[in-house]
Image (cartoon, grey):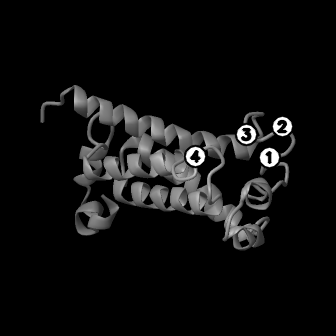
Amino acid sequence: MVYTAKHYLRGLLRITMGWIFLWAFLDKLFGLGFATEAGKSWLDGTSPTTGFLKFGTSGPLSTFFQSLASNMLVDWLFMLGLLLIGLALILGIAMRLACWSGALLMLLMYVAILLPEHNPIIDEHIIYLLVLLLLLKTKAGYPLGLGGWWSNLNLVQKAKWLQ
């Protein structure tokens, strides 16, 4: 297939979305001083979900989300999700899994802060969710990625949900 500028733009969009997820993982794991202060990383024993779930949630479901704060299972699922979604998007592999799980994560984070602070309807979580659905529907794993190689693997051929 001959790739055009729109294909490469989708590839770049996929990589940048992947970096958003991977960066969040790295910052929370090591406490790089951006969203996570040095000394308050996951490796330092601080829950990566507590800050957002305990102090960043609002709206009708805030009590539910606050009850999940510092839960080890929630921490592990969140961190593994950030890592695996980020890597899959950057590499252009397992796009169905990465895009659907990333969209679900964005939806959950949006619902946790109803109503958003700066706009009563739309915030970055909804934009990211829509970008992930766009990437899912446009074979964005192929240009600038390993999507072609990945989709030809026997395992992926047999289990289409891994595409």
Q: Residue at x 25, y 53 (%)?
A: 151
Circle 2: is it few (<14), some (14-19), or many (20+) Cα within 10 Å? some
Alpha carbon separation for disc pair 2 and 1: 7 Å
Q: Secondary structure at mark 3?
A: loop
Residue 71 in percent (x, y) is at: 76, 69
Residue 106 in percent (x, y) is at: 53, 56
Circle 3: is it few (<14), some (14-19), or many (20+) Cα within 10 Å? few
Residue 109: image quadrant is bottom right
Q: Which residue is mark 1?
A: 41
87 and 71: which one is in front? 71
Q: Check if mark 2's residue and mark 1's residue have beta carbons within 8 Å.
A: yes
Name the mark nearer the viewer: 2 or 3. Answer: 3
Q: Which residue is mark 2?
A: 38
Alpha carbon separation for disc pair 4 and 1: 30 Å
Query: Identity of the amino acid at label 4?
Result: Asn
Query: Identity of the amino acid at label 3?
Result: Ala
Q: Residue furthest top?
A: 5
Q: Which residue is mark 3?
A: 35
Q: Which residue is mark 4?
A: 119
Up-down relation of residue 74 to residue 52 (above or below): below
Whether residue 135 sits left or right of residue 121 in the image: it is left
